[in-house]
Amino acid sequence: MPVLVLAVSRLLNRESWSTHKFGLGLLAAIFLLPLLQLAPLPPAIWTALPGREQLVLALDLVGQPTGWVPLSLTPDLTWRSFLALLPPVAMFLGVLAATKDTRLRLVHLYLAAAVASVMLGVMQLASGGERLYPWATTAAGNMVGFFANRNHLSTLLLASLPFAAVLAATALRRRAERGGLTQWIGMLFIGLAIVAIGVIRSRAGIVLAVPALALSVLAAWVASGRSRPKPALLAGVGVAAAAVAAVGFFALAPILARFDPNSPPEGRFENWPIVVEAANNYLPVGSGLGSFDPVYRSVEPLERLDSTFFNQAHNEYLELWLETGWLGIGLLAVFLVWWARRSWTCWQRPPSTEADLQRAASVAMLIIMLHSIVDYPMRTETIAVLFALFAALLEGAARPLLERQKVRVRAD
């Protein structure tokens, strides 16, 4: 909350509102969405909304009048969803208000935290999977770091690859006094991250490692000056290839076991049609942010019941469709337009530390969005805050875009 207040006060004292009006407007719409779902509606309106028949019946059975009710079926969980947005919003606004040096230090801090999480994961495995797990409900026996789910640690590491790559390439381009050290630290980090992803054995992480590495190498090549690949850059590619080879040599069998076609069917894929049907029942307004668990339980077929429960849709987009309806999907479409526009701008910019970080942020956001097709990384507060950090870095591409527009106006 202090960061949020300080960031808003700083942005009010600058011209940032006009520079970032698209990004800030989108952020405001996302931030206000849960509050809109919490606004009380008169009985004549909410009783006519799709999917509210059971609520009307329940009130009739207990003899309660159909008074004013929020749009959300679970207002307590929607309120918690609103509160969960505060840290990402504070991060986004704080990074926008920060200096270039502060933004770079935040990226360094992020990479250091990723290393710390890997080290904790190594100690978790060394303890026999019995200790050093921060959460009571967790994937014990696996490498999870500070998370409860190994898939989310894999997401963290995948998103870190482009930043390590561009920082190493930036040091190569500058040939600063300590550039060589920074370059090798970046290479070692990439090797460590690849090996860790292999040890984690997240199927989505392993599949997404290929595009993450390819795009990271591309971002590093752009950061190095778009010239013929230098020996140092080729050495970085060699380090990544050696890490991949090491994973294949030492951990190929357990990794392939995760993709065994004879293994039990994947529950999330079988449950998606049920989620789609439930989402259609609540269109066009949705059931309310945070309501997935109780809503899914109310429509789950008896033959799907077992000792576990389907806590999330394992598809951020299906869950967003269920909880927010067409409004949420509309905001998602606007967000994708924003991401594509900012990404196009930053990838056209010449090499610089700021542009290099923007390109890395666009890749990191893409990896998280792709992982969200089969999991729920954005429901983890840490990943949500990091996603906001990446979004704020990418929003910096609006500044040169605005400058070019001003130049065109003067020329006209």
Image: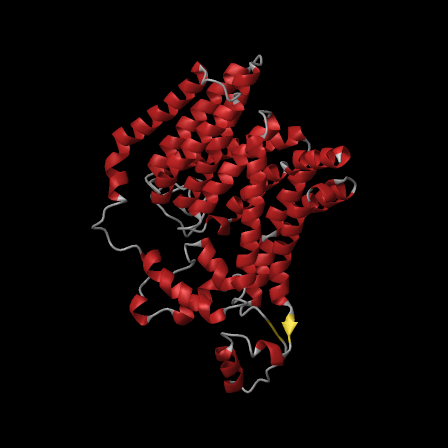
Give the quarter of the image for residue 143. top left
61 relative to 28, above or below: below
**Toward the viewer: 253 or 126?**
253
From this view, report whether residue 222 is shown above or below residue 37. above
Q: Residue 6 in the image: x percent, y percent?
A: 73, 43
Q: Which residue is at the front of the view, 55 or 411?
A: 411
Compared across the picture, whether 246 is left or right of 104 comes to left
Q: Position of residue 391 (x, y in %)?
A: 58, 42
Judged from this view, the residue extending furthest toward the front is 412
Q: In the image, is residue 343 above or below residue 275? A: above
Q: How many tags in the picture?
A: 0
State the image coordinates of residue 393 (x, y, percent, origin top left): 60, 37
Which colour scheme appears in the figure? secondary structure
The image position of residue 336, as x and y in percent, is: 54, 48
- In the image: residue 251, left or right of residue 216: left
- Is 223 situated above or below 318? above
> Which residue corresponds to the image point at 44% horizontal and 23% vertical from the top-left?
187
Q: Is residue 110 visible?
A: no
> Which residue is depicted at the point 36% across and 46% down?
140
Q: Looking at this view, is 222 or 164 the one in front?
A: 222
Q: Which residue, as the protein is rendered here, is positioned at the far right?
A: 13
Q: Quadrant of residue 398?
A: top right
Q: In which quadrant of the rendered image does the C terminus lie?
A: top right
From this viewpoint, is residue 68 visible? yes
Q: Residue furthest left?
A: 262
